Image (cartoon, rainbow, N blue to C red):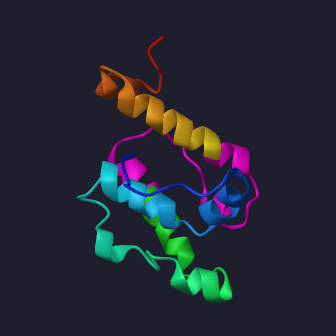
Amino acid sequence: MCISEKLPSVAQFEEELANGVVLGKLACFFSPKTVKAKSIFDPDMTMYRKSGKKFRHVDNISRFIAAMEALKFPRVYQLETVDCYDRKNTPKCIFCLHALRYSMAAPNRQCCLDTGKFPS
């Protein structure tokens, strides 16, 4: 696993996705020049576990979006902050992660990132 952490159970995944910590750590992995580890808010999730989401958790999601933009990841595949933080469109968040994983694993990654078309 690229972030060296165990992901939460399926039941907790949506809630933990909403605080953006996992997204921030993932962005730090695939775009370390854009997202520094020290910039992730509440990386150990102690504040989140004590008192729930804080508005500053939005920063983690924003950093993930900035990292995707730095990679020139097609906008059509990107999630939006409200999709994640407010859980308005969790399937879109999952779709974004799948598209990102697929593009990162593609043999000619730059090709699919530039065109927005994934190789078959």
Residue 8 drawn above or below residue 96: below
Question: Who's the residue at 53% across and 83% down the image?
Answer: 46
- Horizontal side of 106 relative to 87 (left or right) equals left
- Horizontal side of 64 relative to 8 (left or right) equals left
Question: Who's the residue at 55% across and 86% down the image?
Answer: 47
Residue 109 drawn above or below residue 46: above
Question: Where residue 34 appears, x then y in whole percent?
Answer: 29, 60
Question: Who's the residue at 41% across and 24% down the image?
Answer: 115
Q: Residue furthest top?
A: 120
| Image quadrant where residue 19 sits | bottom right
Question: Who's the residue at 64% across and 79% down the image?
Answer: 53
Question: Where residue 73 appears, x then y in whole percent?
Answer: 42, 40
Residue 92 magenta-highlighted: yes
* Numbered range of the magenta stretch: 65-93
Q: Residue furthest left?
A: 33
Residue 30 magenta-highlighted: no
Question: Where residue 22 appears, x then y in whole percent?
Answer: 49, 61
| Image quadrant where residue 11 sits | bottom right
Magenta stretch, main secondary structure class:
helix
- Name the residue nearer the viewer: 86 or 73: 86
- Horizontal side of 20 relative to 73 (left or right) equals right
Would you say residue 55 is visible in this rendering?
no
Would you say residue 57 is visible in this rendering?
yes
Question: Where residue 114 appears, x then y in whole percent?
Answer: 36, 29
